[in-house]
Image: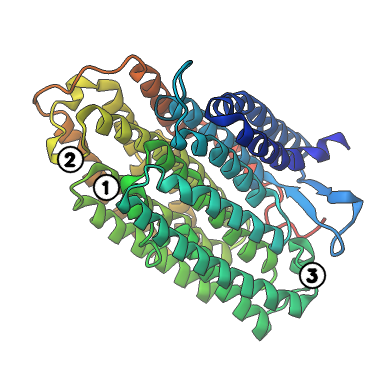
Amino acid sequence: MAWDMLPMLAVMLPVLAMVAAVPLGARGAERLTLAYAPVGLALAIGIMLVVQLGGVPIRQELGHWAPPLGIAFRADGLAAAMLLTAALIIGAIAIFARADFGTAAGAAERRQAFAFWPLLLGLWAAINLAVVANDLFTLYVALELLTFAAMPLVCLDGSRATLQAALRYLMFALLGSVLYLLGVALIYGSAGTLDIVLLAQRVRGDIPVMIAIAVMTAGLLAKTALLPLHLWLPPAHAGAPAAASAVLSALVVKGSFVLVLRLWFGVMARVPMPDAAQILAGLGAAAILLGSVAALGQARLKLLVAYSTVAQIGYLFLMFPLLAASAGEVAAKAWTGGVVQAVSHAFAKAAMFLAAGIMAARFGHDRIADLSGAGRAMPVTLLTFALAGLSLMGVPPSGGFAAKWLLLSAAIGAGQWWWALVILGGGLLTGGYVYRVLAMGLRAGDPAPEPAPVAWQRDGIALALALVSVVLGFLPLAAFGLVQIGRLDVSP
């Protein structure tokens, strides 16, 4: 069917746009990226509608060669949700970034602008490939493309500090890639295929497979920045442009997280691992608590938001023991809660980083202690930060509340009440560091400089993303049924 081509188009079109953007220069690459944004959004909406209305995943066998000889793309409900999230956020960031990386008519083109736009398109292609690829080696290609598109965005200004941060990111990413590829080789030697659907039917819990799952998971956790493998993420955010920080926190770490889900609840769908799942959730709980405490102690706003990302990633891993130890309605709540957390966090954290970037640009710094007067000088920016913070806290009604309530309900239903305590404690700590910024911003102080003419557009983009993270909480539970389509489905 013609609809089967949509997942491939979602990957190939941004790749073609990236290749075409390079010879066009900075100005042409900017125009091409902005022109492609509505096309990418239309593709994502189309995939979502086909999956939702059909009730089954979209599956395409490239070249009409079926696995294990060929490669298949598979867009299920999780993929559809992530494709739409990526399209909305990257499109918004592209508009926001024009103030920093745009090239005015008659102005000289800059190196940073020339690099930014093709890298953004490459990152978009990598995210899409990471969520629709259906074999482990193609997913490895997606991971590498994601790393080598995201890493240069960290050091666009070329300063010593950002280059060091980018190299640290690269070292963690390469370690993760080596571990992941080692696991791929072990699984292929054991099962004779890398297709996830076929592996789910063939894989048993023998020693080579379990070793492979362990090393692959470790590699993916390094790329996801789950504590204690998070050391690359805060420095990467500290000096990166606001647009780069937003896409890194909102989307890049989610790509590797989706691979962890595919590995544990796709490849290993018939091999329960409840004890290992408890370990993963334990790391997630440590990330929630320690990451939030670290955020409370930061003097710089961007580092506070970066450690908040470390903490919020931890919530994603609380779904693992709930899925491994339960079925039916409880498992459905855990799955939905985890996916909604990933989506709502993406919008809220993108908005929060953009707001932090606007404040840093207006004040000339991001020192929290010196942000007094921000509420009077830039009320929309501070409102954006507050709305995003409310979603991260899980205050109703917001997407973060819906996600955390589903996870909390699943924890109680599965008899694992201790994860509910972690969720509640994490929400209180999140409130602490969000309140710290808001209290300082609302204090009377010298006003910041007058905004530039484009400031209202940037404020509007950031506010729109924050509102999306809140509006998700108004949707009825049935609206999240999309993410259940294809869940734990081992049939073609």
Label 1 and label 3: CA atoms lie apart by 44 Å
Marks 1 & 2, CB-CB < 8 Å contact: yes
- Residue 120 is left or right of residue 41, and the answer is left
Location of residue 170 in the rendering, given as x and y in whole percent from the top left corner: 46, 60
Q: In the rendered view of the protein, which quadrant contains the N terminus?
A: top right
Q: Residue at x 82, y 55 (%)?
A: 492
Q: Which residue is mark 2?
A: 368
20 or 287, which lies in front?
20
Label 1 and label 2: CA atoms lie apart by 9 Å
Q: Is residue 481 visible?
A: no
State whether residue 68 is above or below residue 395.
below
Q: Which residue is mark 3?
A: 193
- The three-letter amino acid code for the residue at tag 1 is Leu
Farthest right residue in view? 64
Q: Residues within 10 Å of mark 1 (few under 14, many from 20)?
A: many
The secondary element bearing badge 3 is classed as: loop
- The three-letter amino acid code for the residue at tag 2 is Ile
- The three-letter amino acid code for the residue at tag 3 is Thr
Q: Which residue is mark 1?
A: 304
